[in-house]
Amino acid sequence: PRIVHRIWRFAGGATGVALISLLLSDLDKIVVSRMLPLEDFGYYSLAWRVASPLAIVASSVFSALMPAFSRLAAARDESSLAALYHRGAQLISALIMPAALTVAFFGKQLLFAWTGSEAITDKTWLIAALLTGGTAFNCLMTVPYAVQLAFGWTSLAFWTNLICATASVPLLLVLTSHFGGGGAAAVWLIVNASNLATQAPIMYGHLLRREPRRWYVNDIAIPLLACTLAAAVAKAVMTSPTSRMSAALSAILAGLFIGAVGLLATPLLRAQLWQILAEVRSRRTRPS
């Protein structure tokens, strides 16, 4: 009872955030399944299969960073916390942005390579691109949310998610009725972009107050701009595929190119990469 009394606020807040997040992530599926034919719901579910792996990647990074954040927050070591925070944020950007932009620019090739059906591809690729974009925005808040939990602050995520879930209901009903699955997917994109635009500034007003500029510029803006330009270049130079194999190959090559550019565009990861390469070079040149 003594332990429960000490942690009930944090445990209740974290549970509330998890429940609201679960509701928010499933609202669109409930509405689409009720308002659209079963076939359209099948296309929507397939599009979610394309977008959902991003969340798995982000949750893995969250699990790796959370214990260290908690330890540093308890020790009040803000400088070490800030350094790890930016490394984690840039890692998320380097993993999530290339994948999301590959789907956005090469979603047709990916879906055609997967399904082999042009009809399914035509009805699914836009939904997949919108859902992937919304999931990417959601993943970018993974590291800021981990820091909030490390300091025991759950109310910000709870209330912002609750507001987003409340606003999602009328948006889903209206946009789904007018635009089908694409409208529902657009709501997921709008809600997560709004959450990113509002929750992060509020957090920086209370935690890591000297870090928002580095997060916005180095961790988010520069990788996003670089990956977008790389995706646009890859889209411009690659020819339209004529088979499932060529579609898969073009999407894979584009994803690798965008991923390499994203890695080089994140300052901390780029510096770590150069350090690793320098160590490898020195070992090769060292006399035996």
Image (tube, helix red, strand yellow):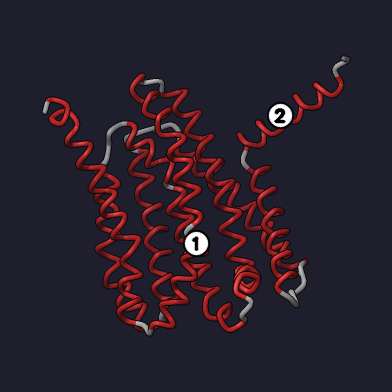
Secondary structure category for the residue under label 1: helix
Characterize the local packing of mark 1: few (<14), some (14-19) or many (20 or more) Cα atoms within 10 angstroms: many
| Quarter occupied by residue 73 | top left
Task: Please state which amino acid type lies under the numbered disc 2.
Answer: Ile
Secondary structure type for disc 2: helix
Task: Please give left or right for residue 233 compared with residue 108 in the image.
Answer: right
- Who's the residue at 50% across and 54% down the image? 54
Q: Marks 1 and 2, Cα distance to the nearest angstrom?
A: 32 Å
Q: Residue at x 36, y 82 (%)?
A: 36
- Image coordinates of residue 182 in percent, x first then y, are 45, 76
Q: Which residue is mark 1?
A: 51
Does residue 77 lie above or below 87 as drawn? above
As drawn, the label of residue 276 is: 2
Residue 54 in the image: above or below residue 236: above
Can you say whether 193 is above or below 114 in the image? above
The numbered disc on residue 243 is none
Quarter-wise, where is residue 205 in the image? top left
Where residue 214 sits in the image (x, y, percent)? 51, 37
Q: Residue at x 64, y 77 (%)?
A: 116
